[in-house]
Amino acid sequence: MNALVPEAVAQLPVLFAKSVANACTSVLGAGPGEALVRRIGDHNLMIPAQAYGRIDAFFSTGSDMLKEAIRQDFRDGVHRLYKIAMNVESKSLSADMAGDALGGVAVRVRVPLTSRRYRAASI
């Protein structure tokens, strides 16, 4: 993804934070999930090791299901981001190919002066 759309890589920490929030609310419910997200802290949400460490600190055991839900949500988000990047790249490539098929660079054709006179006289 970094080779195709480098600006998409900058979105990954935010995407991970959203995955943590989504997984917490879907696994624990809206109220407890939002409370856990607040307890993890905004600065920790974007860094996987810190987010997982905070989750492990709150749930000494049983955090595996929540962490797997986060991984799955993040994996799905990255897949969507990759598909969007591929669609953009595909459209760009097809536009470039269409330009090449049309001749790429505009070519001017000179019409001899005699043929212009002939057309004007015949009309």
Image: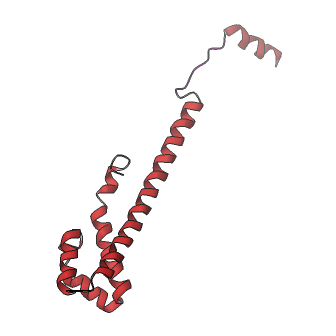
**Which residue does the image show at 18% across and 72% down from the upper left?**
50
Q: What's drawn in magenta, residue-wise?
A: 105-111
**Which residue does the image show at 32% across and 73% down from the upper left?**
18
- Looking at the picture, how far across and down is residue 69, in whole percent? 36, 77
In the picture provided, is 108 more to the left or to the right than 28?
A: right
In the picture provided, is 98 more to the left or to the right than 15?
A: right
Q: How is the image coloured?
A: secondary structure
Residue 33: quadrant of the picture: bottom left
The residue sitting at the top extreme is: 114
Compared to 12, does 119 lie above or below? Answer: above
- Looking at the picture, how far across and down is residue 3, in whole percent? 34, 46
Compared to 31, does 69 lie above or below? Answer: above
Compared to 2, does 119 lie above or below? Answer: above
- For the residue pair 28 and 65, the one nearer the viewer reads as 65
- Looking at the picture, how far across and down is residue 51, in whole percent? 22, 74
- For the residue pair 35 and 24, the one nearer the viewer reads as 24
Residue 119: quadrant of the picture: top right
Residue 12 is covered by the magenta coloring: no
Compared to 45, does 90 lie above or below? Answer: above
**Which residue does the image show at 31% across and 61% down from the upper left?**
11
Residue 110 is covered by the magenta coloring: yes
Please identify the quadrant where the C terminus is shown. Answer: top right
